[in-house]
Image: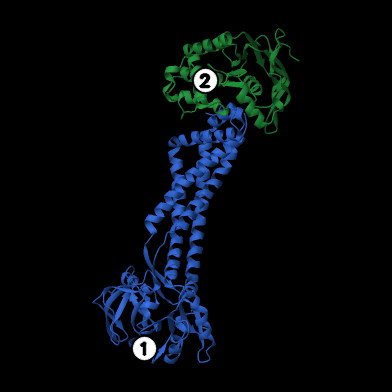
């Protein structure tokens, strides 16, 4: 009579009877399902901001690219090199070369104020002076509208993200830099990397506009291969003429994104945790009312010989099934609403805006559904135990 | 000791020996059954009568293994029901007891035939075998044409017949009926009593029926009366 197969078939049967009865309890079931869907949507939505930010940073840092800053500087803002130092770095072993010369771009970086399209308020936008190798050093940079700036001219090109988020950056418009107006001559893409948040111009032009003499703040290089990093790093850091530190670009951007992703993740987890507590109570309420509405039915099944264990597992399964429904709905909603949503936020390390797209990753979807399952398990446990412990004789007479 | 529950003519299928049942309501103890003795031979149709609160249903629940006595023993087919673990008791009920309830206790989400099939889900019968048993049970209660109807589309009498079909589908040792006509009008109640009588006489089913209706108890082969927790052969005035 007993045995695992018999027990399983009991579980399947009692679960089926519970699920078949859902239409009669649709009000409370809908409340719990949508409650859990809300929790999952918020969790996945908020964490998709952090994931998108991380992705933008990761897209910026290829394994065979490196950045050189002055020793002790944790960002370009506080770094600095003279022309001679940047040449020594560009000529170091490990740097990839083309017939035109080494793939190294000595750059400087200033911040200008531009109004954000969404709010109209002024925000810090990075304006970067680059050398011609920058297009190959920073990854897949290409002009998607207009043309490249002409070296030596007061012209700028703008990243796709910057053009989308900040006002006045359309091709043909002019940008007020210092006391002069610089025309926007082109828009470039960079495969979703942080360069898309920036405005680029010719480095010597920017040096002149900001009275920087012949100084730079950083040197970006493309290496022969990812394995050439150690050779390059050793050469630069041991050169007595330099006081420099070398980082893989991927590590550099990872360190740049840490503060923002930690903040967003903490906030997301906090908000979702608070909501999850509410959703657990919603699930508890739903399953208690389900068990209460089925008191006589469950007692009848137990009187006929169905076991208490099968009843416990069945009520839990019903709760988890409802939670999974809510979780899947919430995750789907989060994907539709948030995935690819464009935004700009402050990157505190560079003290300037960075544009990125929210990323609802498969991992986040799995996390959302897993959270829903946990809510369903917790919400179903106590009602399940109550259903199995009710005295059969008394419960049989419940109306 | 009360001897009125004894029937020495045949070997007993059910033996209730010195049973007491005490319920607790806060600090108060309510003695529902007191040193109760009852023997029911196989093949008997016993009516258990008594006023409300006399302990009829409590006694039926003890015999059916839905509750345990505070003191004394309950044996059915030689097995001491009160000593079985909860898990074994559930399996024992499935194998030996058919229940018929006053309010039918059908699952509203299942058709008549699927309700009847419920106890068979606890057996190792194949689906085809289960269906054969279900159709046979529905034929016995005369409800074959209504097999695919849901309980809400059946009359009270029809629902109770489904309940009886569910009670007999596993061919249990004992059929326990708790006020089976209590929620029916006279005509439907008579049909149910006809059916129970036929199950007893033609199929040899041992039936214990709780009722407070003399009209119903008249159909039984023996009636015992329960009053203030004790049995007697005659109704207490």
Q: Colour of chain A?
A: blue
Which subunit holds the residue at mark 1? A
Q: Is residue A378 above or below residue B64?
A: below
Q: Colour of chain B?
A: green
For mark 1, does the 10 Å Cα neighbourhood hold few (<14), some (14 to 19), or many (20 or more) residues? some
User: In the depicted view, which residue is nearer to us: B212 or A87?
Assistant: A87
The lab-note entry on whether marks 1 and 2 share a chain reads: no
Q: Quadrant of the C terminus of chain B?
A: top right
- Residue shown at 50%/75% (left/top)? A227
Quarter holding residue A194: bottom left
User: Residue B92: in sight, yes or no?
Assistant: yes
For mark 2, does the 10 Å Cα neighbourhood hold few (<14), some (14 to 19), or many (20 or more) residues? many
- Residue shown at 51%/52% (left/top)? A370
- Residue B147, which numbered label? none
Write down the residue under mark 2. Answer: B133
Label 2 secondary element: helix
Which subunit holds the residue at mark 2? B
Q: Quadrant of the N terminus of chain B?
A: top right
User: In the depicted view, which residue is nearer to us: B230 or B165?
Assistant: B165
Label 1 secondary element: helix
Instruction: From the viewer's perspective, tell me whether residue A378 is left or right of residue A127.
Output: right
User: In the depicted view, which residue is nearer to us: B130 or B1?
Assistant: B130
Residue A271 lies, in percent from the top left, at 49, 58
User: Residue B116: in sight, yes or no?
Assistant: no
Colour mapping used in the image: by chain
Alpha carbon separation for disc pair 1 and 2:
95 Å
Residue A304 lies, in percent from the top left, at 58, 26
Write down the residue under mark 1. Answer: A207
Between marks 1 and 2 in the image, the one whose residue lies nearer the viewer: 2
Q: Is residue B40 above or below residue A314?
A: above
Q: Residue furthest right?
A: B1
Residue B140 lies, in percent from the top left, at 50, 14
């Amino acid at each position: 009579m007993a045995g695992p197969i018999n027990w399983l078939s009991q579980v399947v049967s009692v679960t089926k009877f519970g699920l078949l009865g859902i239409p009669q309890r649709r009000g409370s079931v809908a409340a719990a399902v949508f409650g859990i869907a809300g929790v999952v949507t918020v969790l996945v939505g908020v964490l998709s901001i952090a994931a998108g930010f991380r992705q933008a940073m990761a897209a910026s840092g290829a394994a065979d690219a490196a950045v050189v800053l002055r020793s002790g500087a944790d960002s370009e803002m506080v770094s600095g090199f003279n022309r001679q130092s940047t040449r020594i770095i560009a000529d170091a072993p490990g740097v990839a070369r083309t017939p035109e010369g080494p793939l190294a771009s000595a750059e400087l970086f200033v911040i200008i104020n531009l109004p954000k399209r969404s709010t109209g308020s002024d925000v810090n936008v990075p304006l970067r002076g680059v050398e011609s190798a920058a297009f190959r050093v920073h990854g897949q940079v290409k002009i998607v509208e207009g043309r490249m700036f002409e070296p030596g001219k007061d012209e700028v090109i703008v990243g796709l993200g910057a053009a989308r988020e900040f006002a006045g950056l359309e091709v043909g418009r002019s940008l007020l830099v210092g006391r002069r107006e610089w025309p926007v001559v082109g828009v470039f893409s960079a495969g979703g990397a942080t360069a898309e948040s920036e405005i680029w111009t010719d480095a010597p032009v920017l040096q002149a506009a900001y009275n920087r003499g012949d100084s730079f703040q950083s040197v970006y290089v493309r290496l022969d291969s990812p394995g050439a990093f150690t050779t390059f790093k050793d050469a630069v850091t041991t050169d007595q003429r330099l006081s420099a530190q070398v980082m893989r670009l991927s590590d550099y951007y990872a360190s740049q994104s840490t503060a923002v992703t930690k903040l967003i993740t903490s906030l997301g987890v906090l908000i979702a945790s608070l909501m999850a507590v509410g959703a657990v109570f919603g699930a508890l309420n739903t399953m208690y009312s389900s068990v209460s509405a089925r008191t006589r039915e469950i007692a009848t099944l137990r009187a006929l010989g169905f076991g208490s264990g099968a009843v416990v597992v069945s009520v839990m399964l019903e709760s988890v099934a409802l939670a999974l429904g809510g979780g899947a709905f919430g995750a789907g909603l989060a994907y539709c609403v948030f995935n690819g949503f464009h935004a700009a936020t402050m990157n505190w390390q560079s003290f300037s805006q960075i544009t990125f797209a929210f990323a609802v990753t498969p991992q986040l979807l799995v996390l959302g559904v897993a959270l829903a399952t946990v809510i369903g398990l917790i919400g179903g446990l106590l009602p399940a135990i109550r259903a199995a412990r009710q005295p059969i004789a008394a419960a049989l007479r419940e109306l | 000791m009360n001897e009125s529950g004894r029937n020495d003519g045949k070997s007993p299928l059910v033996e209730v020996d010195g049973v007491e049942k005490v319920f607790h309501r806060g600090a108060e103890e309510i003695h529902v059954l007191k040193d109760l003795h009852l023997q029911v031979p196989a093949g008997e149709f016993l009516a258990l009568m008594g006023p409300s609160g006399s302990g009829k249903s409590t006694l039926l629940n003890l015999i059916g293994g839905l509750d345990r006595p505070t003191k004394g023993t309950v044996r059915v087919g030689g097995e001491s029901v009160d000593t079985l673990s909860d898990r074994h008791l559930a399996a024992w009920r499935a194998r030996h007891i058919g229940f018929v309830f006053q309010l039918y206790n059908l699952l509203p989400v299942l058709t008549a035939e699927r309700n009847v099939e419920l106890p068979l889900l606890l057996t190792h019968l194949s689906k085809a075998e289960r269906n054969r048993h279900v159709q046979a049970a529905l034929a016995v209660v005369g409800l074959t044409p209504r097999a695919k109807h849901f309980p809400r589309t059946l009359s009270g009498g029809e629902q109770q017949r489904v309940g009886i079909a569910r009670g007999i589908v596993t061919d249990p040792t004992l059929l326990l009926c708790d006020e089976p006509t209590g929620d029916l009008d006279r005509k439907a109640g008579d049909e149910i009593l006809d059916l129970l009588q036929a199950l007893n006489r033609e199929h040899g089913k041992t039936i214990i029926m709780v009722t407070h209706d003399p009209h119903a108890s008249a159909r039984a082969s023996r009636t015992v009366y329960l009053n203030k927790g004790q049995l007697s052969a005659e109704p207490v005035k």
